Amino acid sequence: MPANLQAHVTIMERHGIDPAQLFSLEPTPPGERLLRSYAAPLMGRMPAPVKTALTDFMKSVRNPGGGLNLRYPSDFSENQAIVDEIAALEARPWRGKRAAVCLCHDVDNQFGYESLRAMLELDIAFKIPATFFFLTHDAYQWQPQVLRGIRNSGSEVALHGDTHDQGLAFRPTAALEERLAKAMEALKDFQVRGFRSPALSVSPALFAGLKKAGLRYDSSLQIASPFYNSVRLPYPVYLKEHDLWEIPLMIQDDNYFRDTRTPDVLALESMGRLLQEVIRLNGVFVLNCHPHLMACRWDFYGKLLALLRSSKEVLFTTMSDIVDIVSERPA
Ligand SMILES: [Zn+2]
């Protein structure tokens, strides 16, 4: 567990909460593995309108009501058990702040890539560093100077895979390792330390591959979406078995704007609630906003950044910096 959260770890131990167990990889059901491995690559070759229609259909099957359906940290018994004791610590474990915010941007497609400059400019205007997760060999041709611009502004370049392969985690080990190595080689000038798996597919073989490829952290496990396993705790956890840090993803914009049609005001209210709950727990709030989704909603995105910025209790930093903080020895 993180060096800066020793008191928090003690509280969790007293309540019998085992982060290692909550963060262990759930086996993916065979049907989903099959779908991710075969159906997704086929879909990749379809024309965009067909792809959108199919994706919408699959969402409607998963979430028939279409309403916003999220789990907040306070919905989980683990957080309910510890939150009052943690708040009573009045701790400021994140460089003197009560919590940390890691804004990130998965760059999934050409439109996302074209929109990232505008996004970076907004992030800079609000003085919020971000972590950009790139695909190295997918449908957009990235330019080194764009990635250099991200780093020079104090933001981070990280890896989202060679392609947006939803079945990446389930490919044969040799192929998986070769693809990760190729992607890391392409980004070798950008000190990449972090990874988020396409469509959050994970497996022990993937995590072993990340370690082998020289990555230090993963951010593919998540908390608030009911569509995936939830690790429940908003803390970075060191995965001993894989020698990697996991910095869990709290929420993504697609929960509000792709899987559901949530009005802006409700989306902001929900994100504000997630942030406040993470502050009370002294955790890390990892929020993924895709440039291709925000590009149609700059007004909303500006309001979101203003909302995040309105809290004086949080450290705004990159996930790579989080790894440095949690790895520091306790004073
Ligand atoms: Zn993605």
Image (tube, grey):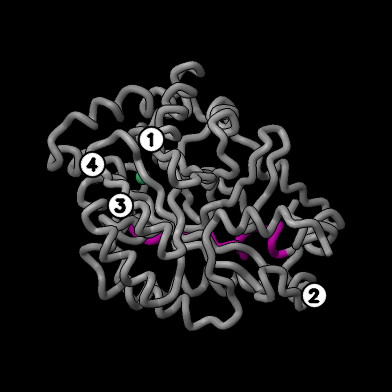
Q: Residues within 10 Å of mark 2 (few under 14, many from 20)?
A: few
Q: Residues within 10 Å of mark 1 (few under 14, many from 20)?
A: some
In percent of the image, x 42 and y 57: which residue is there? 151
User: Which residue is the site of mark 1?
Assistant: 186
Q: Answer with mark 4 or mark 1, whichever residue precedes in sequence.
A: 4
Range of residues picked out in magenta: 66-80
User: Which residue is the site of mark 3?
Assistant: 145
Give, as a three-letter code, the residue at label 4.
Answer: Tyr
Give, as a three-letter code, the residue at label 1.
Answer: Ala
Give, as a three-letter code, the residue at label 3.
Answer: Gln
State which quadrant residue 148 falls in.
bottom left
Between the C-alphas of marks 3 and 1, the distance is 14 Å
Q: Answer with mark 2 or mark 4, whichever residue precedes in sequence.
A: 2
Is residue 95 located in the magenta-colored stretch of the structure?
Answer: no
Q: Answer with mark 4 or mark 3, whichever residue precedes in sequence.
A: 4
User: Which residue is the site of mark 2?
Assistant: 89
